[in-house]
Image (cartoon, grey):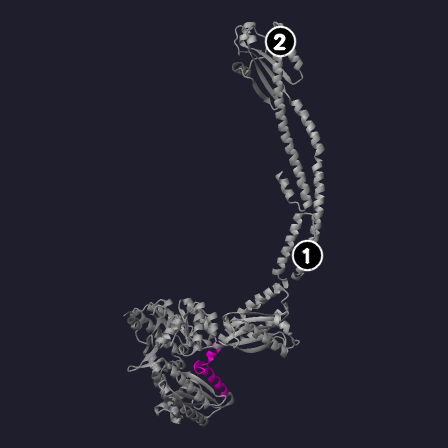
């Protein structure tokens, strides 16, 4: 039955379900009725049989008493009993009469059935006993008690004694069988009636339900897109049942809700495709205006959009408005949109009426039809999103002008797209700005906006190649500001920076268009004069000298401070054919000018050429002897952890011990590289530095500078591994660093080299980070542990907001990538405080400590 019920539940139509359920209910009803009626009938027949047995027993006793009162004989008694039996034969009744033992003693025994326990119990108790023999048979045992009138014949008995028992047993199975036959007859006769009734009801209900379903289907077939939901209406149709009417009214309410929230498939696909395009790549950053124009084209595939505009906050009262048009707009359309955007801005509390707006127009499809906008359409159909404070990249608003106002779902999509675009366009603009700044500062000196040292070396290399191809000369001027240390120390760094800017400006006035002008570092400037011989170079140098002589700035105390310069001249190929040799020659000439009294131009003679190269040769011999005699010594400059103001690392610097003096790395590194002994110097310094670290007990990190040659020497890592193992210093404490300028030239070798370093267990740092073009490339591809920020940026932290922004950007980016940062050239408490504020991890510079032969000197001082 359970299995059948489950099959019924699986019925697919209401009609079959009603019929099946009607049949099931009929079966359950008739089956239950049969069981209940049968039970009641059995009980009724049984009770009736008991009453009939009681009546038979009493009537038998009455008949017996009548006979006994006439003084019946034994033969009469036996005849009476036999007559009763014959009379009851075939009626279902059996009757037995039992004489009590006392009566037998008085009158003798009669022919009677054996007395069983039940009859004996009635003799003993004197109580009537009813017994169910079987489902359709009962037994009724009636005691014959002595009454007052019986005592005359039964002298030995007392009132209430049981003188006999009448045992009546009745079998009523025949009556029950006959009743059941009649019941089944009528049951079979009536059984079809519920099924017929259920069928009629099913037809009625099914017709009304079918009508309702067909009405729903007709309306559903009309819906092919979200806009068709507006056409869907069931009206006031009466479906015949209140329940169906309520279902249809609820369905209409549901359709109404769908109208307000549903989105067309093409809109969803549009959103998905648009989101896929929200990936910021280097191409997007470089050409972000073109990127937004392409987005305009994509948006118009789904939503008819004339313009997209973005608003950026440049200054407190200055904003940039970039308007992107689908196709070229008419002048009147431009003016209408500009007026509408200004209206939106003026109505927003974050924008004032006095705000200045710089407007830029961009066109996605220049060949498209001209856009003519109606004033009313522009007023109503411009949808904008303005924010209270600038978001990423300074963006404060974004909006569109599109035909969307009559469609709530499309308005929702537009608002969603605008919210996303607000962040995406802002991010693109921010990265564009930061990337542009990075590229600019990678090539420019942040103080003077001149080319920096790195670009100078590249440009002089290009100029040498060009001059060789065309068999031409060019000149190099090395210009040094005289007595600048006195100006810096006397009036402060801020005034010193202003003085350097004025000095650079004066030099620029003495040059012509096409000359290459760069700040080499500190108060040194270099100028490359293309297609210039010695005589022409001297003319330019004297003109520059005259311009610098005119400098007169008012110091903070009101005193007029003037400037003078010493200029060294070198000519390619007369004085050298290699970039570094040409620079060294000009550098020697500049020092000759200073030695002769400053404020002059040193024009090289033939003797100067001999002296300079003799000096270079002598330095080469000195370096060669120092390497052979292992007089290369390490100096240690402390590095401070800004979090707890403790010395946690030292940088190893190379020096040559000349006995009475020490030669700094700046004097011999370039010559050593040209001589090919720089790798031997590296090995000596590493070995001696680690030995001193082990001897002194210094337990911090050790930063070791490497030359670019280390990248190409296959034996470098095995040699260094052996040195470190012999020194007993843990590899994870050693940080090898290369300058960003050097890594640019060896980018592929660098990747392999860094991976091998990390596999050995060493750490890696990029020095002078921010000075090159490929900063982000290193961060993305190489496992870098430390970034040592370009010192020029740190020096100008207090005075140049651009440098502060740039350093902050590097620090934040490094934190995101779990890279530690080191600020170099920290030379004042104010700069150290700013380094703390920017979240830089380590600080290094003369304020922290100057290079010293002992790594423990500043550590001990800190502990003390």
Task: Characterize the local packing of mark 2: few (<14), some (14-19) or many (20 or more) Cα atoms within 10 angstroms.
Answer: few
Q: Secondary structure at mark 1?
A: loop
Q: Is residue 725 left or right of residue 284?
A: left
State yes or no: residue 466 in magenta.
Answer: yes
Q: Position of residue 562 (x, y in %)?
A: 38, 89
Q: Which mark is residue 233?
A: 1
Instruction: Measuring from the top left, give residue 496's x and y in whole percent.
Output: 38, 83
Please say whether residue 495 is visible from this viewpoint: yes
Q: Which residues are magenta?
A: 438-467
Q: Position of residue 51 (x, y in %)?
A: 61, 20
Q: Residues within 10 Å of mark 1 (few under 14, many from 20)?
A: few
The part of the image, by quadrant, that contains residue 480 is bottom left
Dominant SS type (magenta): helix
Q: Is residue 48 left or right of residue 458?
A: right
Local SS, label 2: helix
Image quarter in which the C terminus is found: bottom left
- Look at mark 2 in the image and give the residue it sits on: 66
The picture places residue 354, in percent across and down from the top left corner, at 52, 77
């Amino acid at each position: 039955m359970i299995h059948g019920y489950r099959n019924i539940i699986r019925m697919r139509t209401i009609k079959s379900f009603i019929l099946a359920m009607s049949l099931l209910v009929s079966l359950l009803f008739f089956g239950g009725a049969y069981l209940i009626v049968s039970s009641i009938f059995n009980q009724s027949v049984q009770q009736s049989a008991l009453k009939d047995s009681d009546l038979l027993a009493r009537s038998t006793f009455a008949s017996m008493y009548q006979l006994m009162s006439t003084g019946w004989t034994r033969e009469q008694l036996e005849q009476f009993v036999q007559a009763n039996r014959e009379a009851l034969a075939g009626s279902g009744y059996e009757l037995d009469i039992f004489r009590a033992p006392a009566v037998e003693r008085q009158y003798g025994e009669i022919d009677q059935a054996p007395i069983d326990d039940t009859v004996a119990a009635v003799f003993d108790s004197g109580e009537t006993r009813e017994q169910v023999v079987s489902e359709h048979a009962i037994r009724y045992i009636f005691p014959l008690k002595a009454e007052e009138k019986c005592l005359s014949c039964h002298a030995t008995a007392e009132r209430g004694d049981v003188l006999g028992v009448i045992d009546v047993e009745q079998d009523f199975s025949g009556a029950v069988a006959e009743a059941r036959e009649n019941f089944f007859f009528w049951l079979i006769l009536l059984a079809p009636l519920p099924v017929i009734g259920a069928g009629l009801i099913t037809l009625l209900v099914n017709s009304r339900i079918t009508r309702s379903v067909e009405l729903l289907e007709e309306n559903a077939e009309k819906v092919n897109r979200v806009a068709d939901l507006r056409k869907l209406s069931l009206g006031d149709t009466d479906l015949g049942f209140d329940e169906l009417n309520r279902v249809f009214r609820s369905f209409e309410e549901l359709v109404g809700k769908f109208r307000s929230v549903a989105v067309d498939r093409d809109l969803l696909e549009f959103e998905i495709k648009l989101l896929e395009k929200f990936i910021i790549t280097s191409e997007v950053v470089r050409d972000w205006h073109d990127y937004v124009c392409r987005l305009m084209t994509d948006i118009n595939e789904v939503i008819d959009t004339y313009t997209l505009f973005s608003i950026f906050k440049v200054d407190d009262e200055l904003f940039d408005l970039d308007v992107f048009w689908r196709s070229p707009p008419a002048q009147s359309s431009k003016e209408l949109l500009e007026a509408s955007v200004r209206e939106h801005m003026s109505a927003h509390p974050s924008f004032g009426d006095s705000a200045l707006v710089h407007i830029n127009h961009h066109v996605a499809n220049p060949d498209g039809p001209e856009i003519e906008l109606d004033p009313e359409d522009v007023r109503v159909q411009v949808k904008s999103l303005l924010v209270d404070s600038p978001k990423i990249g300074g963006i404060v608003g974004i909006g569109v002008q599109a035909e969307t106002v009559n469609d709530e779902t499309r308005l929702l999509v537009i608002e969603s797209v605008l919210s996303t675009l607000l962040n995406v366009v802002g991010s693109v603009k921010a990265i564009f700005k930061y990337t542009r700044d990075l590229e600019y500062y990678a090539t420019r000196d942040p103080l003077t906006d001149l080319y920096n040292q790195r670009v100078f070396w590249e440009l002089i290399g290009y100029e040498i190649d060009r001059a060789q191809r065309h068999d031409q000369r060019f000149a190099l001027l090395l210009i040094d500001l005289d007595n600048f240390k006195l100006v810096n120390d006397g009036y402060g760094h801020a005034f010193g920076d202003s003085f350097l800017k004025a000095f650079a400006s004066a030099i620029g006035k003495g040059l012509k268009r096409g000359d290459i002008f760069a700040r080499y570092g500190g108060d040194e400037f270099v100028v490359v004069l293309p297609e210039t011989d010695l005589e022409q170079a001297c003319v330019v140098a004297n003109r520059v000298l005259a311009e610098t002589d005119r400098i007169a700035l008012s110091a903070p105390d009101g005193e007029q401070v003037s400037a003078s310069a010493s200029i060294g001249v070198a000519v390619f190929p007369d004085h050298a054919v290699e970039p570094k040799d040409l620079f060294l020659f000009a550098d020697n000439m500049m020092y000759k000018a200073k030695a002769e009294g400053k404020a002059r131009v040193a024009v090289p003679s033939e003797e100067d050429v001999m002296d300079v190269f003799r000096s270079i040769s002598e330095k080469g011999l000195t370096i060669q002897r120092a390497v052979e005699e292992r007089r290369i010594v390490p100096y240690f400059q402390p590095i401070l952890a800004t979090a707890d103001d403790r010395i946690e690392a030292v940088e190893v610097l190379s020096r040559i011990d000349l006995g009475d003096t020490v030669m700094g790395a700046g004097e011999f590194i370039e010559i050593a590289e040209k001589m090919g002994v720089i790798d031997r110097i590296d090995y000596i310094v590493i070995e001696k530095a680690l030995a001193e670290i082990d001897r002194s007990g210094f337990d911090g990190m050790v930063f070791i500078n490497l030359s670019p040659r280390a990248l190409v020497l296959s034996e470098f890592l095995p040699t260094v591994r052996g040195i470190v193992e012999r020194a007993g210093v843990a590899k994870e404490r050693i940080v090898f660093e290369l300058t960003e300028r050097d890594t640019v030239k060896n980018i592929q070798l660098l990747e392999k080299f860094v991976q091998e370093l990390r596999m050995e267990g060493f750490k890696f740092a990029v020095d002078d980070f921010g000075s090159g073009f490929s900063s982000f490339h290193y961060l993305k591809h190489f496992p870098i542990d430390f970034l040592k920020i370009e010192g020029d940026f740190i020096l100008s932290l207090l005075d140049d907001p651009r440098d502060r922004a740039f350093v902050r950007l590097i620090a934040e980016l490094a934190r995101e990538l779990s890279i530690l940062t080191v600020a170099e050239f920290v030379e004042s408490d104010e700069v150290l405080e700013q380094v703390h504020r920017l979240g830089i991890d380590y600080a290094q510079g003369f304020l922290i400590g100057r290079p010293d032969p002992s790594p423990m000197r500043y550590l001990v001082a800190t502990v003390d």
